[in-house]
C-alpha cells in the first residue's frame, strides 16, 4: 500500500481566518480526485473537549457519530467531505495531557521523567498517525487551532516540525495568513504575513504553500514579494479572497491550483480527473435560488450565529434543494413576550426552536411555540426545542399550568420532561450525556416517515432529559403524537401534531447529519412545506 500523506494547516496574523474551511476545501478537492481523505483538528486549550464550553466562548459544540463532543470545524469537515468524524478527528491539549498522565499512572513510561518533549509531542504525533493507520486514509489533513506565536500551540508546532522531518516527501505544510488592506493608501500589506512565517520558521517549520486571506485580489508583485521573503515557490502563494458562500472556496482553491501544488509536492499524480460536478451543481442551484423562504430561529444565542452553525447550514442546504434562498432571522428568545410575539414572528414561513441548556430564554421559546401552534406556522423543535413543544402543549392544551422539565423546575408535579434513568447518578458534566448515534423507529403514518422515506433512521443526540412516558397516552389523545421511538429503550425521539401543517419536534439533532451533497431529510421536508406558504 502507498504511504499515507500528511498535510498540516497552520494559521497566522489573526485568528478566525477560516482554517477549517480551507482544510475542508482542500480535502474536498483531493477527495474529488478519488483519494480517501480525513481531516482532524488539534485545539490548544485545556478543556478535555468542547462539550463543557459555553457557546459564547467557542460557538457550537458539534457532535460526531460516535458521540464525541467536538469543535465546530468538524461540522465543516463533514459537510464538505460527507464522511462521518469520530473522536480521532479532534484533540485538545487537555486530552493529550490526559492520555499522557493516564499512561504515566499506568507505569508505561518505566520510571522516566515525563516531559513536554518528548512525551507530549510523541502523543500528538501518535494521534496524527493513528487515524491513518486505523482507517487506511490516503491523505490526512491536520488543522492546528490557534495562531502561530501562541504559547499554548508550541507543542503542536514542534510536533509538526518533527513529523515533517520524519515524513519527508510525504508531508506538506500550508500556512494561512491574513493580508491586511490599508484603505487610506489602497494597498495590501505583506509585512504581517512575513512576520508570521518568520515565527513559524523560528520554530523550525518551513511552509510549502502560503494561502493569503484577503479582501482584495492580489497581484503578481505581491506573490513575488511574499515568495521571496518567505522561501515559498511563487506558484505556491495562493490567494484566498472572501467568497460569497463558504461552499465556493473549494473552487477558488482549485482555480489557484492549490490541489495540484500539494499533489506535485507529495509525489501523487496530478493528471487524475477531479469530479467536482455534483458540487458545482449545488453551487449553481444556490446562485439561481432567488425566491426567499423566511425562517426564524428562536434561541438564546441569537446574537451569535456560530452557536447554531450546523442548524443554519442545514437550513441552507435544504433551501437550495428546494430552489429557495434562505432568509434567516435569528430571534432572541429572551426578549419574546406574549405581547410582542406576533411582531417578532411576523412574516415568517417557518420557525425553528433551538436546542439549549438551562432556563434562560425558555419562556420566549414556549410563547413562540404557542403562537406557531395556534397559527399553524410550520415549526421544527430540536432537542430542547422539542421539550418546549411538549411543555407548551401540556400547559395550554392539557391544562397543566405547572408542567415543566425537571431541568428547569426539579419539583414540578407535572414533570412532562424528566431526567433519564441512567443519568440520575451522574455528577460529572463532561461527556456524560446521551451522546451520538441512536436508532429511531418511525410510525409509518407520520409526517416524519414521509420525510425520511424509511422506518428506521439514525440521528445524533446530546441530551440528559427526555419525554416522560407516563404522560404519553394523554398527549396522544389530545393530538400530540409520539411518532418516533428508540426501538431498544422506547424513549420518545419525535413528536408531531398531524392536524397541523408541519409541527414536529425531535429529541435528536438532525443538523449534525446534513451535508452539501446529502441534505438532511427532515430539514428538506420542513423547508418544502415552508416554501409552499
Ligand atoms: N437541556 C436539554 C437536555 O439536556 C436539551 C439539550 C439540548 O437541547 N441539546 O435534555
Image (spheres, grey):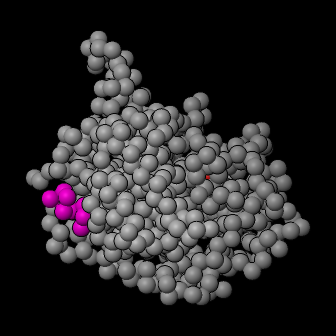
Is 336 positioned to the left or the right of 57 in the image?
Answer: right
Residue 377 found in image quarter: bottom right
Give residue 154's position: percent from left, percent from top.
41, 35
Q: Magenta stretch containing residue 263, yes or no?
A: yes
Position of the C terminus, as image quadrant, is bottom right
Up-down: is 98 above or below 143?
above
Give residue 3's position: percent from left, percent from top.
14, 50
Give the residues in magenta.
Answer: 259-267
Give residue 398's position: percent from left, percent from top.
78, 60
Q: Magenta stretch containing residue 433, yes or no?
A: no
Is 421 positioned to the left or the right of 414 in the image?
Answer: left
Residue 106 found in image quarter: top left
Residue 233 found in image quarter: bottom left
Is 276 positioned to the left or the right of 177 in the image?
Answer: left
Q: Nearer the viewer, residue 436 or 124?
A: 124
Q: Is residue 486 visible?
A: no
Q: Nearer the viewer, residue 185 or 141?
A: 185
Q: Residue at x 69, y 66 (%)?
A: 330
The dominant secondary structure in magenta is helix
Q: Residue at x 24, y 67 (%)?
A: 260
Amino acid at each position: 500500500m502507498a504511504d499515507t500523506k500528511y498535510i498540516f494547516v497552520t494559521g497566522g496574523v489573526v485568528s478566525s481566518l477560516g482554517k477549517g474551511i480551507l482544510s475542508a476545501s482542500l480535502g474536498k478537492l483531493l477527495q474529488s480526485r478519488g483519494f480517501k481523505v480525513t481531516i482532524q483538528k488539534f485545539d490548544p486549550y485545556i478543556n478535555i473537549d468542547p462539550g463543557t464550553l459555553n457557546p459564547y466562548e467557542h460557538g457550537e459544540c458539534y457532535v460526531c457519530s460516535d458521540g464525541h463532543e467536538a469543535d465546530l470545524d468538524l461540522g465543516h469537515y463533514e459537510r464538505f467531505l460527507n464522511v462521518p468524524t469520530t473522536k480521532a478527528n479532534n484533540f485538545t491539549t487537555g486530552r493529550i495531557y490526559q492520555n499522557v498522565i493516564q499512561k504515566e499512572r499506568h507505569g508505561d513510561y518505566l520510571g522516566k521523567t515525563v516531559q513536554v518533549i518528548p512525551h507530549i509531542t510523541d502523543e500528538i504525533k501518535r494521534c496524527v498517525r493513528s487515524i491513518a493507520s486505523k482507517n487506511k486514509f490516503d491523505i490526512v489533513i491536520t488543522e492546528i487551532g490557534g495562531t502561530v506565536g501562541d504559547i499554548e500551540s508550541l507543542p503542536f508546532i514542534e510536533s509538526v516540525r518533527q513529523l515533517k522531518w520524519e515524513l519527508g516527501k510525504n508531508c506538506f505544510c500550508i500556512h494561512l495568513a491574513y493580508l491586511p488592506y490599508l484603505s487610506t493608501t489602497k494597498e495590501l500589506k505583506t509585512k504581517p504575513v512575513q512576520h508570521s512565517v518568520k515565527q513559524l520558521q523560528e520554530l523550525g517549520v518551513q511552509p510549502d504553500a502560503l494561502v493569503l486571506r484577503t479582501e482584495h485580489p492580489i497581484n503578481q508583485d505581491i506573490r513575488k514579494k511574499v515568495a521571496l521573503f518567505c522561501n515559498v515557490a511563487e506558484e505556491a502563494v495562493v490567494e484566498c479572497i472572501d467568497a460569497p458562500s463558504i461552499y465556493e472556496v473549494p473552487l477558488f482553491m482549485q482555480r489557484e491550483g492549490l490541489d495540484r501544488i500539494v499533489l506535485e509536492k507529495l509525489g501523487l499524480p496530478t493528471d487524475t480527473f477531479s469530479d467536482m460536478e455534483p458540487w458545482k451543481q449545488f453551487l449553481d442551484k444556490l446562485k439561481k435560488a432567488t425566491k426567499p423562504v423566511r425562517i426564524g430561529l428562536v434561541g438564546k444565542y441569537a446574537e451569535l450565529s456560530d452557536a447554531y452553525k450546523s442548524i443554519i447550514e442545514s437550513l441552507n442546504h435544504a433551501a437550495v434543494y428546494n430552489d429557495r434562498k434562505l432568509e434567516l432571522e435569528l430571534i432572541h428568545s429572551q426578549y419574546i413576550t406574549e405581547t410582542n410575539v406576533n411582531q417578532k414572528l411576523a412574516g415568517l414561513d417557518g420557525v425553528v426552536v433551538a436546542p439549549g441548556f438551562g432556563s434562560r430564554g425558555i419562556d420566549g421559546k414556549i410563547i413562540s411555540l404557542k403562537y406557531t401552534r395556534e397559527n399553524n406556522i410550520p415549526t421544527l423543535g430540536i432537542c430542547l426545542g422539542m421539550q418546549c413543544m411538549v411543555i407548551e402543549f401540556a400547559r395550554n392544551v392539557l391544562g397543566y399550568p405547572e408542567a415543566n422539565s425537571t431541568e428547569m423546575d426539579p419539583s414540578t408535579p407535572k414533570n412532562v420532561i424528566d431526567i433519564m434513568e441512567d443519568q440520575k447518578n451522574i455528577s460529572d458534566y463532561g461527556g456524560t450525556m446521551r451522546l451520538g448515534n441512536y436508532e429511531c423507529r418511525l410510525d409509518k403514518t407520520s409526517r416524519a416517515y414521509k420525510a425520511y422515506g424509511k422506518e428506521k433512521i439514525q440521528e445524533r443526540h446530546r441530551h440528559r432529559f427526555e419525554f416522560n412516558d407516563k404522560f404519553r397516552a394523554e398527549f396522544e389523545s389530545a393530538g400530540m403524537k409520539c411518532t418516533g421511538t428508540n426501538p431498544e429503550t422506547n424513549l420518545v425521539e419525535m413528536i408531531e401534531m398531524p392536524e397541523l401543517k408541519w409541527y414536529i419536534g425531535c429529541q435528536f439533532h438532525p443538523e449534525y447529519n446534513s451535508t452539501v451533497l446529502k441534505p438532511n431529510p427532515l430539514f428538506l421536508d420542513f423547508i418544502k412545506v415552508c416554501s409552499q406558504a
